[in-house]
Amino acid sequence: MQSFDLIVIGAGSGLNVSSSAADMGMKVAVVEKGPMGGTCLNRGCIPSKIIIHSADVAETIKKSKLFGINSKISSIDFRKITGRASGIVDKEAKEIEEAIKNDKNTTLFKTEAKFISERTLKVGNGTISGEKVIIAAGTRPLIPDIEGLKNVDFVTSDEALRLKKQPKTMTILGGGYIAAELAHFYGSLGTKVNIIQKRRLLIPNEDKEIAEKFTEIFRKKYNVLTECNATKISKKGNKFIVNAASKNSNKKLVSDALLVAVGRIPNTDILDVKKANVEIDDKGFIKTNDYLETTAKNTWALGDIAGKYLFKHSANLEAQYVYNNIVLNEKLKVDYTAMPHAIFSSPQIAGVGLREQDLKQKSIDYAAGRYDYIDSGMGIALQDNNGFVKIFADRKTRKILGCHIMGTDASTLIHEVLVAMKANLNADSISNAVHIHPALSEVVQRAVRNIEW
């Protein structure tokens, strides 16, 4: 059995800790069966944003007549679009693997791992133990229990990012952020999209008003069935047949491709974490304290598998804290203040802090401000008729409680607000700062100035 100072399971954000620990002279083991870089690099945010940019370009071309330019899309090289993304991420993954292999203090085990006991794992045909262990093994797509689903060759987001042939029609099961982004990608390039969503609204975890408006916009572009369940799935020839049922009707959807995007589940079952005395919650995510320590001695968890936030940026934050607590022997509680998120669909969505429904549920005395993109100079130039900003502040302290944006560059605009929140500044810090006119960022400042104190 080989022994290490530190074992890191998962080569996503866990690598932030392993590489720094190795630089400090620790003997490190990295265990990863798949390509290096984790979900974000290989099956998530990086390839999806590369291909979604192509969809954004296509959408801009379709709207060009609004701006006096008569243009059209003569053809789409779908294989080139997905191939470009795959080529970029595969190259990066290989470079990361080479860097790990060339690190004299790091040993890479490119195989599946299973716990045998606390801090001891079976890796391939061997066994390793560590003085300290970090579990950062991520999540995988959830496959729902629907009659016939396992008998057909559906795709998840893992495969949908790498398809070489564009389907003429696609049915998507699910209405969260993954479904919203991939519907935009395929739909903007010309695929006819059906969406089956159990809930009343798409992206239901967003601020209610944003979710309602987003659902309304998507209904105009795609065949959206909400409060609807897929009851049976089959295949006839090359066509997928999805039977869907709602309160008032039953429908049969026929399509060339079937995408399952109903959520993600943690890989704790594959690792057999219970044998390491690592407790999990009822959804399978690892239970951790404020320091990201698990219930097992000298064992930490970070990233998606810990279930706090399922974002790359939150995983990177957690990795920094785990490094400080493990390698530097500090005792720091993770500070998740002003944790933002974004959905790269069309329209784009971004948010930070509390939603309006949260504020009402908690009976917080808040003041709200709102501003529509189209009332700004840049909003008029862009002809963004749907974009708007909502911002909430404590009525007494004027501290920002939350902000939610739908529209062009929402994921960029949100940063002004989260920096103010992180710095514990009040709303006046934004309204009093000079903003470039007529930059789009004026919509944030004007939303703050519209707060009804």
Image: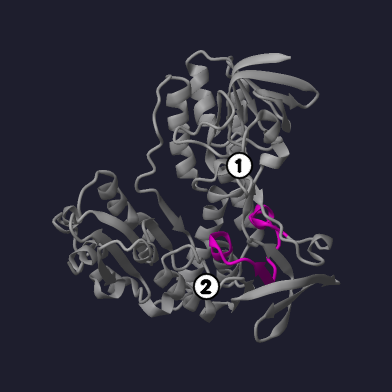
Q: Is residue 304 above or below residue 231?
A: above
Residue with the mark numbered 2: 201
**Left or right placement of residue 31 versus residue 148 in this view:** left
Q: Is residue 276 above or below residue 213?
A: above
Which colour scheme appears in the figure? one colour
Q: Position of residue 197 (x, y in %)?
A: 61, 71
Res 176 quadrant in image: bottom right
Q: Are marks 1 and 2 in contact (CB under 8 Å)?
A: no
Q: Position of residue 133 (x, y in %)?
A: 59, 25
Q: Residue at x 41, y 36 (%)?
A: 334
Query: Is residue 331 among what the camera can see?
Result: yes
| Residue 21 disc label | none
Residue type (three-letter) at the residue carrying disc 2: Leu
Res 384 quadrant in image: bottom left
Q: Residue at x 70, y 19 (%)?
A: 128
Query: Is residue 440 among what the camera can see?
Result: no
Residue with the mark numbered 1: 138
Of residues 357 and 12, the one drawn nearer to the viewer in this rendering: 357
Q: In the displayed image of the protein, which residue is found farthest to the right?
A: 237
Labels 1 and 2: the sequence-earlier one: 1
Q: Is residue 169 magenta?
A: yes
